[in-house]
Image (cartoon, rainbow, N blue to C red):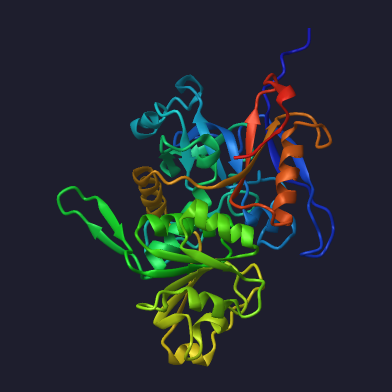
Amino acid sequence: MAPPKEPTHQAVTMRHVPGPPGKVYYPLALTSHPTPHPPPSPSHLLLHPTHLSLNHRDLFLRQSLYPSPSFTTPLLSDATCVPLPPSSQHPSLPPSALALLSHPRLLINPATGWLSSPSAPESSSFEIYGGTKGAPLGLAAQTVAVPAAQCEICPPHLSSPEAAALPLVGLTAWRALVSKSGIVDVRKDTSSGAHTYHGRGRHLLVTGCGGGVAGMVVLLAVAMGCEVWVTGGSERKVSEAVARLGARAGVVYREEKWERRLKAMLPEERPFLDAIIDGAGGDVVKRTAVGGGALLKQGGVVVSYGMTVGPSMPLLMGAVLRNVEVRGSTMGSRREFGEMVRFVGEMGIRPVVSRVERGRWGGVKEEEGTILQALETLFDDMKHATQFGKLVLEVVDDGDDKEKGTMSKL
């Protein structure tokens, strides 16, 4: 009689193929492990990711445009997770970790090595989870072992796809807006210790409104009282930012002299911007911060959290003479993650989900309804920039109602 098979835990990784950065596109691969990846310890919770969301870093990893790609670490940084029952957890979990098991859904801080410093990570080993050599954890797996200290209780008003869409873009947006832009006043109640966030009357431009981070910046800023304008890749995306996110108005960045059109939209009594939050780079400083008719006020701030147009954003002397500041912002600390999740819960903010694809573990990429096929569909959306909001994978059990198909749209 053959011995019983050991349980296996599947995960999605990349498979290496030769090719130069930007030209190569690493295929997705399904791998199996005898234990969760990484192996659990007394400080880790065993969780089951039920919904996962993509970020642009995942696409950049597959294109070899992101540092230190790993071909063994599972992909993806974001997930809605369900705790496994206490009987499946490590027997030596501390009480603080055991308390988290009573909650039906948990969110994971998507990075490690940064606790609370307001300026930058305390550790030189700061890493974002998913698909890199520096961090052993990625969330595209059947079961994951996550440090309990990285877990936050999921706000109950969020659907599971919305919750999966939140962590990385929410944290990046929060730091760029609250910690770096200089337009949000943070006040602490001396009796309760609770924080309030006020940006009333401040004027903010958010570029590339169809992206996940940009959309979250708009949602957070509007909730704090800011007046927000946007740029987008099409009139449809600008219209959706106004209708669904609460932006005041916007322009299509593909148009010549879009900055002049935006200037005409600003109110006469305060015809300037206090800050710009940008993920594109390129000539945004030249277009907005230089000259007598500049959009950005003297002493205004440009926060850069990415450069999708190209790896540079020139700071011109004209901007220096106007005391314009350019501030880089990458992700955020564990403390900022907790602040963001609490604010989202208090204000009832819902991340925008563009599309949900359903997929089951097992099978190969070519099989309809598998996780690999569903992920490839979502990656295709991201490559062609067709989405407005986040792209989410719903993990379904093999016995779930397959005749319903694999796709839904929110």
Q: Position of residue 140 (x, y in %)?
A: 64, 40
Could one spot residue 112 in this view of the protein? no
Q: Is residue 352 above or below residue 213?
A: above
Q: Position of residue 268 (x, y in %)?
A: 39, 78
Number of marks in picture: 0
User: Based on the displayed image, in which of its 4 quarters is residue 364 positioned?
Assistant: top right
Q: Position of residue 310 (x, y in %)?
A: 67, 73
User: Based on the displayed image, in which of its 4 quarters is residue 355 positioned?
Assistant: top right
325 sits to left or right of 305? left
Identify which residue is drawn at 59% across, 76% down. Answer: 258
264 sits to left or right of 11? left
Q: Is residue 349 above or below residue 362?
A: below
Identify which residue is drawn at 47% across, 80% down. Answer: 295
Residue ranking furthest to the left: 191
* The C terminus: image quadrant: top right
* The N terminus: image quadrant: top right
Q: Is residue 272 above or below residue 342?
A: below
